[in-house]
Each structure stands twice: as structure tokens, then as C-alpha cells.
Image (cartoon, rainbow, N blue to C red):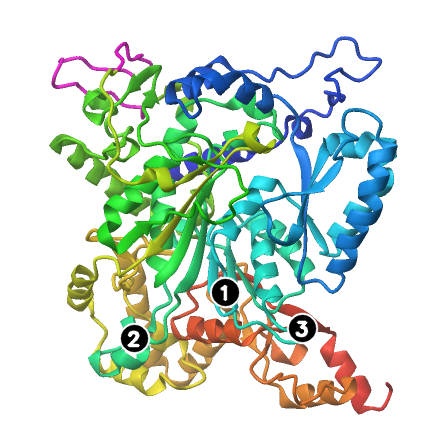
Amino acid sequence: MGGGRKRGRTQRRHFKQGRENVWKHNPQRPPAGEAGEGREGNPSWQPFATENPAFEEYYKEQQIIPEEEWDDFISMLRKPLPATFRINASCQFFQDICSQLENDFRKSLETEVSDEHGEDAIRPLPWYPGNLAWHLNFSRMQLRRNQALESFHEFLKRENEVGNITRQEAVSMVPPLFLNVQPDHHILDMCAAPGSKTFQLLEMIHQSTKPGLLPNALVVANDVDVQRCNLLIHQTKRMCTANLIVTNHEAQNFPGCNLAKFCSETCMDEAKLQRLEFDRVLCDVPCSGDGTVRKAPDMWRKWNAGMGNGLHRLQVEIAMRGMGLLKVGGRMVYSTCSMNPVENEAVVAEILRRCGDSVELLDVSSELPELARRPGLSTWKVRDRGSWFGVHEDVPRYRKSVISPSMFPSGKGSKDIEVNTDVLDADMKDSTDMGEEGEQERNTAIDDSNNGDSAKTEEKTEVDCESGEAPTRYKKLNSTSTRTEHSDYPLHRCMRIVPHDQNSGAFFIAVLHKHSPLNENQVVDWVKSEQSIPEDKTGKLEKDLGSDKVSSEENIVPQQVVDNTNVVDGEQNGDMDSKSSKDKSSEDAKVIVDEAEKGQAGTRDRRRQQNQGRWRGVDPVIFFKDEVTIKSIVSFYGIKDSFPLEGHLVTRNPDTSHVKRIYYVSKSVQDVLELNIKVGERLKITSLGLKIFVGVRLITVLYQHKLL
């Protein structure tokens, strides 16, 4: 258990470092100039090498682009990435900003900048709807250092701070566009930080609503890392929205809030209506990030083939959890900023393989017709320890537990492989029981057993039964598979965005549609067999289904009971947040017995515990119902009756007598919060709604004493 946590921390650290610019970690090394020269006065400095022979060999072998385009492709990867930004169409002044860009800055920049950047120095991206996204012929560094661009740079910074624009890589803007968001949709952004795509989704739902009205839509933005959640909150608070919930969970174990699993068959029909599902899911998973080498040049040095291999299983788990949370008839977009087919097409093929006829890979070639994209690959290879493999059967036996069948186009493996895979799945489920600390450690993981192009095994030696050899962790493979496979799935419907098509970064996008529940018959039988809530407790829950509040005792249920979105191919998705299901169930049973013995004292303790919230270190979300204070606020500010406050105000302070901040939430957020309370606060909410009142108690007292 402890070793797993240590590996998780190491993996996350490696992932973060791999995605950040080298200059942030090397302040002594001066940045390159526009022509690649070092800073004057430091002749010993050498430009950072934008090359990696292993990288070039890998992608030449994968044939992600035709051979005749290779020089253009690799040349573009070595150039700085142009700066891009997006205008917030839901802001009050977006038309003025568009006019200023078109009539003022566009003309002035063409005359002031006399070098090769002058022509089309700034232009709208042709594929983004409404000319709301703009491309600059300058990198971020050039934008900061060119004196002629100073006023424009200040304009960008100022408008970005207030939320009128968002500075975002062009290809990163693509996935939300293919979600086809509608005004009433519930949307889940599974791996949301740093928040640019989340902000884009919020723009869409507010843009579709009449001014002065709150949309019926909702965005739940999730990230596994607390610090990245803070960055996400900072990014999205510029939107000033009441329709956002920020959560902190492992994406692959995102909680299922389903009230039906607490009820007997007599109340099942009513409870089925109370479950958290999403019309749209954005599954922009953690990846090796080699599509970002133009803005993060340190990736050239860090990249190795094992990075993608180490993330493949996590990516499949996250995508499958997203499919489980998606409503029937809904759409999920799977995306990465990697060019590696093991992280892209292989994951999509595994989703289709597991889901069967329930899920379809959509052909969206007619959408955004001006966006240059390439079709997905139907064949690829897997590289491990310096060797290439086209089929899983050719992988040495002692590596088959690391290189899984799902990494290959057919997804097929031999019987002994299936046994190894089952063992790994069991280990993976056990690792989800590591608790809140483990939840924050397993996301965005690059397998730290990979070093260079050599993926290392665990600290143990296994005997190869076929050869009688005992391979060590340092042994190199000396054989390369010549056989290859072709996927039977229509992976050409996926999209690959390559840099030299439109002077951008690289990205991969797949759009999936859910036609029917996933393995519904198996799930229903399994849930019934696992249903173990006492009859007296079930009756109590039935009675409280329509009530405003259900006590925390009434929401305790064994974790083995899951909803039908949590099980795929007969396997339970690891939907556990703090402890293993067995330990959690025994603890819950002990709490019930203790409370019955303690009587009224136990009831007071239970209420106090409920007010403190379930999640350690995170303030609970409590509906603010102090009518005296609310009436004082309405009277003092002259709030009209047409602006509803009842049920829309929440606070994070368990002591309602000393509330300092009150947040306003939309009706859609209110419904999710009420459901979350009924199911025992399964969502770990780090931020929500719009902060509208600060120091309410002081204002109320002053107003009541006629001091204001």
C-alpha cells in the first residue's frame, strides 16, 4: 500500500514536470530570442536542443503522417507556438472587443510590425464559430518582448483578468466544440484543470441564455489534485457563474450519486429520477503531452515511449467511468494532447470493445469543416524496452502484464494473458481503497518505472516458463515483432490535428455517442444480489425521499451496492472515496449501533458531524435558511421578488450564526446539492456558485440598528 502511494506521488511529479516549460525550472538559463540566440553577455549558454532521436524514430515507425511530409512536420514542431486567445461571447462587451480587434489592433499591428510577422499579424481562426478565436503570428515570448506589441499585450492581460477573453492554445479549444452543448445540458469535465475548457463550456451555456436569466445547464468540473483545483477555481471565477460545481476526485472513480440504490423496489421508480448523470462528458485525459513540444520544449528531452504505455490503463479507466456517467443519448468527447496511438486510437478501440453496441464512434467530419484534421489510425505498433511489437502474442511472457492486449489494434491476447490482466485489475481495485490521499496521487501518472526507452519491471524476478530464463529488470529485449494488426473498428472517424496543417499544436479527438445502458441486464441482477439495506432502514428512506433533508445515518449504505453506470463487462468500477467497501460497511454498522445506544446525545453528535461535512479539510456545503438575515438582505439591497433567493443560497461555514460569505447557486446546482446530501455527501465539493454576500452578519446588524 505504502509503495503504491510513493509511486503515485512520483508519477504525478514526473507528469507535472514533463508538461511545464524548461525555463520555469532553470532560472539561470536565459530564454532564447526570436532567432534562437542566447541572452547577450552569456556566451557560454547554448540553445536548448529541440530534438530527440527516439521521438523521431517512434513516430516515423507509427506513420502518423506520410513520409513525404515528415520534414515539414518536424520543422514545425521545432518552431515556437503562436499565441491564441478566445473572446467570451457571453460577456457584456464582446462585440466591442471584436470591433476593437478588427478595426484597431489588426490594422495597427500590420503597420507597426515590419518583419515577417507583419502580414496577417492577427487574424480570426477560420474554423472557430463567430470569429471568436484569434491567432497571432507571435509566440508568447515574442509578444512579451516586442516593444511594438506592448499596448496589445497589455490589452490581452487586462481583458483576460476580467474574463472577457481567455488565452488558450488553439487546438485546446476544439474538444468542447464537438460536444454540441445545449442550454439545458448537465456537463461533466472529468480532468478539468487548469480550466480553459471548463471556462469555454461555461461560455457556451451562458451564451445560449437570454440576458438576465440563469441557464438551466450545469457544469461539474473535476480534478484529482487539490492545487490544480485551486488553479481551476481561479480560472473559472472570472466567469462569475452560479452554474458551476468544482469537485476533487480521481476521475476514474468519480462518485455515482444514485438514490435508487438506497431504496427497495416499492420506491425504486421515484428514486430512479434522482441520480446524477450527464448529457455531455468531456474526457480530456492525462497524457504524455508530446503534442505540446512547441510551447513546452523540455518535452524534447524528457520524452520516451514508455510514457504513453504507462498511462494507457489509466486513460481507459477514466474514459469508461465517463461512459458510465453519461446519459443514454448523450455524447462524450475523448481527447489528448498526445500523438501516441497507444494513448489515442488504442483507448478508443478499447472503449468500443467493452461497450459493444451501446456506444458508437461518431463521424463528425461535416462539423467545423474549416478545421484541418487527419483521420485516426487503424494500425500501429507498441514499443517496449527498445523492441517493436505488432501483436500482443509476440510480447515476451514476463512483459505481458505490463504491455496489455488493449494497447494493440485487435485488443486480443492469449489465455495466460487474461489471467495476468485479471490480477492487475484486482491490484488496481485494491489501490483505489487507499483513501483520500491515494485519490489525489493516482491521477496524471507517468509510469516511473519507465526510464528512457526501457520500461522497468517491479523489484522481483519471474521465471519464463517457455525459455527457463529468469529475466531481470535490466534485461533488454532483443527481438522485434514483424506481424501487425488492423483494427476492425471505424477509427478513421477519430481526428488527428497535426502542427503543420494549420500552424498549431497537436491534438487527438474522438466523439462517442451512447445508444443504450452498458450491460444493463448483468448489472440489474448483480445489484439485486448485493442489495443489503435493512427493511426498517429502507422504509425510513422511502418516507424521506421527498423531504428537504435526510440525515447522514439514513444515507449509509454498503459501498458494494453500485448503480448500473458503475459496472462494465461484469466488473465493478472502483467507486470508493475514503476506505474499502468492507471497512466502510463495518464502520457504518458500528455507527448505527452506537447511535441507538446513545439516544439523544448520539443524535446531537450525529447532527454536529453532519454539519462538519464528510470530507476532511473541505468545508461542507450548507443551505442558508436564516429567514431574518435573508429578509434583511432583500430589504437593504432592494432585491425584487423576481430574483429568487429561497433555496439558492449556500454557505461553507458549519456555524450558521457566524456566516461571513453567502454563495448563490442556480436551480440545477441546487438539485445536485440536495441529491448529494441524500446520498451521504459523496461529492467532494471544493467550490461552487457565485459569492454574492460578504460579511452578511455585520451588514444585518448595522441595518437592524439603523446604522446604514
143 to 205, vertically: above or below: above
Determine whether the residue tagged by mark 3 lies in a helix, strand or loop.
loop
How far apart, in angstroms, are the residues tagged by discs 1 and 2? 48 Å
Report the magenta residues as a range. 457-480
The answer to which of 490 and 687 lies nearer the viewer is 490
Mark 2 and mark 3 lie on one chain; the one further toward the N terminus is: 3
Disc 2 vs disc 3: Cβ atoms closer than 8 Å? no
Q: Is residue 337 magenta?
A: no
Q: Which residue is mark 1?
A: 182
Q: Quadrant of the C terminus?
A: bottom right
The answer to which of 528 and 568 lies nearer the viewer is 568
Mark 2 Cα within 10 Å, few/some/many (few <14, many 20+)?
few
How far apart, in angstroms, are the residues tagged by discs 3 and 1? 16 Å
Q: Which mark is residue 593?
A: 2
The answer to which of 197 and 75 lies nearer the viewer is 75
Q: What is the quadrant of residue 496 in the picture?
A: top left
Dominant secondary structure, magenta: loop
Q: Which residue is mark 3?
A: 211
